[in-house]
Image (cartoon, rainbow, N blue to C red):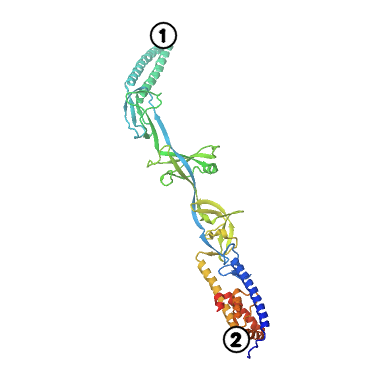
C-alpha cells in the first residue's frame, strides 16, 4: 500500500483528541464497573435467573454462594426413657425409742456400750431387784392366807346346807356363810392381781431393748437412782435397718402417685454430690395434703440400708423412678428449635431439602429428649446449622460439602474453557488488523489499556489502521470488540 502523505497534521490532531476523550470516558466506566463488582461479589457470581446453582438449589436462606447450607444431622432413634423425679431428701429413722425405766430404784448394772447394735429383748441395764422381790413375797403371802380362809368358809357353808335340809339351822345363817365365801373369793382375785403386779415390777428391774437398732451415747451411770420420770432415760435406740428418706415432690405428680402407690417404684439415694449411690429402695407412702407455701407433697421412701450408708438426719439426693416410656422416639436436644408457633424440627428429605415439622417435647434423657408426637423412628433431623434454614431450604451434609465445592469449581472451569474458543476465533478474524484497536462502550479497563497502546503509533500507522477498520465487515468489527471485551475479563491473559 502506498505511503500516506504528511499534509494532514491538523486532522490527525483532532482525531487524537477524539480518541483521547473516548479513552477517558471508557476508563471512567471501567473504574465504575470495577468498584461495583468489588462491592457486590455475591451478585457478580450469581447465576442467571432460572439457572440452578452448582451443588444445590437456591431455596435456602443464607445458604451461601451455592444456595445450600452445610448442616449436621442425627437419626431419630427408639429408646426406653425412665420418668424420674429428683428431689432433696432427709434420712429419718424408721423408729427411735428413748428407753426409760418402768420402776424406780438404784441402777446396779449397765450392760451395753455406746454405739452398740442391739436386738429387741437384749438387757441394757438392771435396777436393784431386792425391794421388788420382797413386795412379791408379800403379795404371795396375802394370796395364800385368803385362799386358806376361803377353803374354811366353803367347808362351813357345806355343813350349814346339810343342817338346813334337816331343818336344824336357820336359813339366815346359811345365807350369811355363803356371802362370806364370796368375799374370800374376791379377796383371792385381788391377791392374785397384787402378786402379778409385784412380779411385773420385779421384771421391770431388768431394762431391755424394745426395738433392734443402735444405742446412742450413755445418759446415766451406775449408782444413780432412776425412775419413769427421768427425761433422759437410760439410753436412746435408733432403728437403722430399714430406714426411711423423706422428700418433697411437686403437686402435679401427687395424683399419679396416689393412684399408683401400690405399684413398685424404685428409689435411689445419692450423696450430696450425686456421684455415689448410697442405697436402692422403693417408694413408701405419700402425705395426705399439699403444703400451701411450697406447692409440694411430702413423700417417703424406704431403704434396707444393709451397708449402713444412710444415717439419720443426713441430706441425700433422691431419684424416684415413676415409670418407663417404652419405645420412645428420641433425638438430640439440639435438634429442637423454638419458633413463634411452638417447637419444631427440620427433617432432612431425600432430595437434600429440609421440611419444618412441628413437634411436641416429651421427657428429657440427658443430652437427648423424647419427641412425643410429630416424628417417626428413622427420620433424619438437623442438629447443626438450623439457624440459617427455612422450610424447603436445600442443605449439604458434612461429607457432601467438598464434592459440591469441586463441582462448582469445575463448572466455572468449563465456562472459562468454553469462552476461550470464542476469543481464539475473534483473534483469527482480527489477523492483520491488530493495529486498529476499536474499544467499545462499557469495555473493561484492560481493553482501554490495549487501546492506549495505539498512542505510540506514527500518523502513517494510525491512518493504515483506520483504513483497515473501514475495510472490515460489520461481523469482523464485532469480533474485534468481543476480543477486547474478553481480554478485559481474562485479566493478565487478555493483555498478552
The first of marks 1 and 2 along the sequence is 1
Q: Residues within 10 Å of mark 1 (few under 14, many from 20)?
A: some
Circle on res. 432 = 2
Q: What mark, if any, has residue 169 been given in the picture?
A: 1
Report the number of numbered marks. Answer: 2
Quadrant location of residue 169?
top left
Across and down, in percent, residue 36 comes to 62, 68
Please give the name of the residue rendered at 51% of the width and 61% of the height, measured from the top-left corner: 72
Q: Is residue 28 above or below residue 479?
A: above
Give residue 365's position: percent from left, percent from top.
49, 52
On the rendered structure, is 198 left or right of 36?
left
Quarter of the figure with the N terminus? bottom right
Q: Is residue 196 above or below residue 305?
A: above
Relative side of 234 to 448, left or right:
left
Which SS class for mark 2? loop
Asked if the residues shown at circle 1 and circle 2 are in contact, with their CB atoms under 8 angstroms apart, the answer is no
- Asked whether 319 or 164 is in front, the reply is 319
Residue 56, image x and y in percent? 57, 67
Q: Is residue 339 visible?
A: yes
Where is residue 387 drawn, in percent x and y?
56, 58
Front-lying residue, 323 or 36: 36
**Quarter-wise, where is residue 158 in the image?**
top left
At x 66%, y 75%, the residue is 21
* Camera-nearest residue between 477 and 283: 477
Q: CA distance from mark 1 to mark 2?
A: 182 Å
Mark 1 against mark 2, which lies toward the viewer? 2
Any part of residue 400 in sight = no
Drawn side of residue 376 relative to residue 318, left or right: right
Q: In the figure, 156 relative to 89: above or below?
A: above
Amino acid at each position: 500500500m502506498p505511503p500516506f502523505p504528511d499534509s494532514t497534521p491538523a486532522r490527525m490532531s483532532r482525531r487524537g483528541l477524539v480518541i483521547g476523550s473516548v479513552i477517558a470516558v471508557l476508563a471512567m466506566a471501567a473504574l465504575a464497573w470495577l468498584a461495583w463488582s468489588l462491592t457486590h461479589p455475591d451478585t457478580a457470581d450469581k447465576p442467571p435467573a432460572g439457572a440452578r446453582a452448582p451443588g444445590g438449589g437456591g431455596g435456602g436462606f443464607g445458604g451461601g454462594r451455592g444456595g445450600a447450607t452445610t448442616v449436621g444431622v442425627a437419626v431419630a432413634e427408639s429408646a426406653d426413657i425412665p420418668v424420674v423425679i429428683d428431689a432433696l431428701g432427709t434420712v429419718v429413722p424408721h423408729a427411735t425409742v428413748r428407753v426409760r425405766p418402768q420402776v424406780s430404784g438404784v441402777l446396779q448394772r449397765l450392760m451395753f456400750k455406746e454405739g452398740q447394735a442391739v436386738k429387741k429383748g437384749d438387757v441394757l441395764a438392771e435396777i436393784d431387784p431386792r425391794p421388788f422381790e420382797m413386795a412379791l413375797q408379800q403379795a404371795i403371802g396375802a394370796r395364800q392366807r385368803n385362799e386358806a380362809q376361803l377353803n374354811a368358809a366353803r367347808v362351813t357353808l357345806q355343813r350349814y346346807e346339810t343342817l338346813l335340809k334337816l331343818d336344824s339351822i336357820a336359813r339366815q345363817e346359811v345365807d350369811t356363810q355363803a356371802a362370806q365365801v364370796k368375799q374370800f373369793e374376791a379377796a383371792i382375785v385381788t391377791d392374785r392381781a397384787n402378786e402379778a403386779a409385784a412380779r411385773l415390777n420385779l421384771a421391770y428391774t431388768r431394762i431391755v431393748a424394745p426395738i433392734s437398732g443402735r444405742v446412742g451415747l450413755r445418759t446415766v451411770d451406775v449408782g444413780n437412782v432412776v425412775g419413769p420420770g427421768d427425761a433422759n432415760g437410760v439410753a436412746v435406740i435408733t432403728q437403722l435397718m430399714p430406714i426411711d428418706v423423706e422428700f418433697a415432690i411437686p403437686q402435679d405428680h401427687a395424683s399419679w402417685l396416689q393412684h399408683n402407690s401400690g405399684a413398685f417404684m424404685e428409689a435411689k439415694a445419692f450423696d450430696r454430690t450425686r456421684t455415689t449411690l448410697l442405697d436402692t429402695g422403693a417408694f413408701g407412702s405419700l402425705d395426705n395434703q399439699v403444703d400451701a407455701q411450697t406447692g409440694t407433697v411430702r413423700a417417703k421412701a424406704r431403704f434396707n440400708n444393709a451397708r449402713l450408708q444412710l444415717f439419720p438426719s443426713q441430706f441425700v439426693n433422691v431419684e424416684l423412678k415413676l415409670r418407663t416410656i417404652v419405645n420412645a422416639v428420641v433425638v438430640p436436644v439440639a435438634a429442637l428449635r423454638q419458633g413463634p408457633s411452638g417447637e419444631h424440627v427440620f427433617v432432612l428429605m431425600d432430595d437434600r431439602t429440609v421440611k419444618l415439622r412441628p413437634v411436641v417435647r416429651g421427657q428429657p434423657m440427658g443430652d437427648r429428649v423424647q419427641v412425643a408426637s410429630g416424628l417417626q423412628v428413622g427420620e433424619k433431623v438437623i442438629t447443626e446449622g438450623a439457624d440459617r434454614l427455612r422450610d424447603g431450604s436445600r442443605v449439604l451434609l458434612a461429607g457432601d460439602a467438598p464434592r459440591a465445592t469441586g463441582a462448582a469449581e469445575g463448572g466455572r472451569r468449563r465456562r472459562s474453557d468454553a469462552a476461550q474458543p470464542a476469543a481464539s476465533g475473534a483473534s483469527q478474524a482480527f489477523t492483520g488488523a491488530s493495529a486498529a484497536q476499536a474499544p467499545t462502550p462499557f469495555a473493561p479497563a484492560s481493553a482501554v489499556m490495549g487501546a492506549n497502546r495505539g498512542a505510540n503509533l506514527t500518523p502513517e500507522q494510525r491512518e493504515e489502521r483506520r483504513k483497515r477498520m473501514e475495510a472490515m465487515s460489520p461481523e469482523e468489527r464485532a469480533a474485534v470488540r468481543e476480543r477486547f471485551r474478553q481480554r478485559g475479563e481474562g485479566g493478565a491473559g487478555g493483555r498478552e
